[in-house]
Image (cartoon, helix red, strand yellow):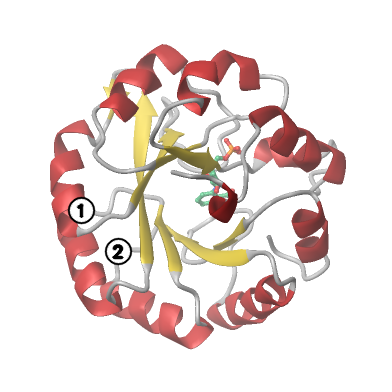
Amino acid sequence: MTHHHEGELLADAGVDLVGLWWAVPGGHAELSSDRVAELATTVRGTGQLAPVLVTFSADIERIVSTMRETGISWLQLHAYQPPAVVRELRRRLGSPATIVKVLHVGAGGCVEQRFVPAYTRAGADLFLVDGATPDGRLGSTGVPLDPAVVLPLVDSLDQGFLLAGGLTAANAGEYAGIAGHPRMCGIDVDTGARGSDGRFDSGQVGGLARQWRVGRREERDD
Ligand SMILES: O=C(O)c1ccccc1N[C@@H]1O[C@H](COP(=O)(O)O)[C@@H](O)[C@H]1O
């Protein structure tokens, strides 16, 4: 989210977490710390949404100070930050923070597969399974993942996971085995939530919420 008015649209359409992109060099939605703070206030003001700081940064001091200054408690580490960074962030941010580590699936499978136990020991609360394209793009790729590759990966996890990567209302049926997985906690969508003009579209977001049958966290029993 980059504009204040998007908060109400997302809340009304059934979303519960909103990503604010910070320290994402070259990202189409890169925000300054001050802008993140303003938008986080708007997000919380809906009474329904919680903001997530989404970042490529591995700079522990900057991440911790931005989380504290903005009051954001959800952190999505979207790049290749190592387990040592997760461990130090967990130590510094404490248990109130929810740390989401992205696991990238490329042509050869999950790039971080062998680090998964280390991320778990380091204190990651959730994993987010997303794609990495052959040309190295991360985040907002709009490229769907092969469910046959994702399923054994999520089966190998000890904690909950979110799914991303080119998700739409129309392709929900292809991921039935993953959507019904006992550790499935939700989906994370950028491209498929937008209309042809590139803006968030309430019809697209509402369709995603309905087709994926993703309830709010407090309404689920997982
Ligand atoms: O959307 C972005 O610009 C972005 C920037 C930096 C990190 C992550 C970003 N988006 C994340 O990408 C995935 C899936 O996106 P898509 O549905 O395939 O377009 C999701 O986790 C977004 O939060």
Horizontal side of residue 100 vs 140, given as left or right: left
Amino acid type assigned to the residue bearing label 1 in the image: Pro
The answer to the question of whether label 1 and label 2 lie on touching residues, with beta carbons closer than 8 A, is yes
Residue 82 shows which numbered tag?
1
Q: Is residue 104 above or below residue 91?
A: above
Please state, as top left, top right, bottom left or bottom right, where the C terminus lies in the image: top left
Q: Position of residue 190 (x, y in %)?
A: 64, 43
In the rendered image, the vertical position of residue 204 relative to residue 146, given as above or below: below
Which residue is the site of mark 2?
Answer: 58
Q: Is the CB of the residue bearing disc 1 within 8 angstroms of ligand 1?
A: no
Give the Cα distance between marks 1 and 2.
8 Å
Q: In the picture provided, is 103 more to the left or to the right than 3?
A: left
Relative height, residue 141 to residue 19 (above, below): above
Extreme-front residue of the structure: 221
Q: Which kind of residue does numbered mark 2 sit on? A: Ala
Residue drawn where x is 62% and y is 75% of the image: 40
Looking at the picture, how far across and down is residue 70, in whole percent?
Answer: 52, 82
**SS state under label 2:** loop
Camera-side residue of 191 and 209: 209
| Rendered-image quarter of ligand 1 | top right
Q: Earlier in the sequence, mark 1 or mark 2?
A: 2
Q: For the point 56% across and 26% down, which residue is it?
A: 143
Q: Which mark is residue 150?
A: none
The reply to whether residue 168 is in sight is no
User: Does the Cβ of the disc 2 residue fall within 8 Å of ligand 1?
Assistant: no
Q: Residue 110, image x and y in percent?
A: 29, 28
Q: Who's the residue at 44% across and 80% down the image? A: 66
Q: Residues within 10 Å of mark 1 (few under 14, many from 20)?
A: some
The residue carrying pointer 2 sits among few (fewer than 14), some (14 to 19) or many (20 or more) residues within 10 Å by Cα, namely: some
Please say whether residue 6 is visible from this viewpoint: yes
